[in-house]
Image (cartoon, rainbow, N blue to C red):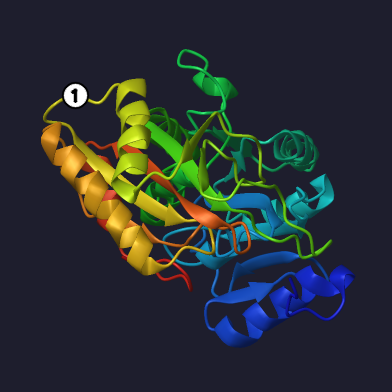
Amino acid sequence: MRKLINRSEAIVDEMIDGYLAAYGDYVSRVEGRRVVTRAVPKESGKVGLVIGNGSGHEPIAVGWVGRGMLDANALGEVFAAPPPDLILEAIRAADRGAGVLLLISQHAGDVLNGEMAVELARAEGFEVEVLLMYDDISSAPKGSESERRGAPGTTFIYKIVGARAEEGADLTELKALGERVRDQTRTLSAAVAPGISPLTGEPMFSLPEGEIFLGMGVHGEPGFRRMKGATADEVVAAMMEGILDDLPFEAGDEVLAFVNGAGGTTLMELLIVYRAVAKILGARSLRAYKPLVGEYVTTQEMAGFSISLCRADEEMKRLWDAPVAVPFYHR
């Protein structure tokens, strides 16, 4: 499949150039580095929020740099974690005198490079804490939550912790809030068709015609169950059973619900999926608070979706509602 690129080695830099040209009122760039920052920095005395991640999953996370969410994003190569020195550059750019919280979506390269960057930053005198993010129930069994992968449910952390950081909470409170959100979040995905790697031009995985793979990771990591010829309602029912039983959610709980498209799934399909999610929530006496539906965490044109639920308290709901001004987040 043909991609609209020039040279494979220039993909990331040319994407950043185009992003800055289009959204320069929101974002800027550390000169000569693949670090995107706010065009207008956060006020002094507030904690900075940073993440480093591989490119190819946009709009996360570069699309969420701005007021109410991230202060800086270090971008790695396509599907590859950024090196420690680049994450360090993002930490430097985000520091406003009150410390920096580094978000790390739990994947091996991201964790290794992120932890090395923190060591370097602390050696330079920066106050930095790490928040490991994980939510994919297919990647490790119940009881081993800390071994799970980061998945689209990390969106709740970006938005809620970002909003509280904007209000001026300190580093200790923000890390604790992020852990609370993480521990109340569960995600499961379904793959319908592979995305095409912009580096090789080849499919990232293969699926037999008519099959849907439950549990597929954002990089094509293997899932755990195949469903053949299933309807949207049947797929959602299987996914929701796993999610709701994993926490477990209880009747009367209020939840944040997020249906994310993997990159090549139409809004029509995503809304049909959410229709099924809403029905199941209602049948379990769970209330969805201001759901989010759209393509935010993608893997090129991969067809599929994920369902994320976060059991929300009043503070989480308030911060979910808080104002945000970034190029690629709305509800």
Location of residue 311 with respect to 67 vertically, above or below: above
Which residue type does callout 1 highlight? Glu
- Observer-nearest of 177 and 272: 272
- In this view, the residue farthest toward the bottom is 21
Q: Quadrant of residue 19?
A: bottom right
Q: Quadrant of residue 76?
A: bottom right
Residue drawn at x 35%, y 50% as measured from the top left = 258
Residue drawn at x 28%, y 45% as measured from the top left = 256
Residue drawn at x 26%, y 57% as measured from the top left = 321
* Residue 178 visible, this angle: yes
- In this view, the residue farthest toward the top is 143
- Observer-nearest of 183 and 287: 287
The image quadrant where one finds the N terminus is bottom right
Location of residue 124 with respect to 140 vertically, above or below: below
Left or right: 299 in relation to 67: right
Left or right: 316 in relation to 75: left
The image quadrant where one finds the C terminus is bottom left
Residue 40 point in image, percent of width and height: 54, 74
Residue 33 point in image, percent of width and height: 80, 66
Residue 52 point in image, percent of width and height: 68, 51
Residue 102 point in image, percent of width and height: 61, 43
Question: Circle 1 sits on which residue?
Answer: 250
Number of numbered discs on residues = 1
Q: Quadrant of residue 245?
A: top left
- Observer-nearest of 274 and 74: 274
- Observer-nearest of 250 and 33: 250
Q: What secondary structure is found at the residue carrying circle 1?
A: loop
* Residue 31 visible, this angle: no
Q: Residues within 10 Å of mark 1 (few under 14, many from 20)?
A: few
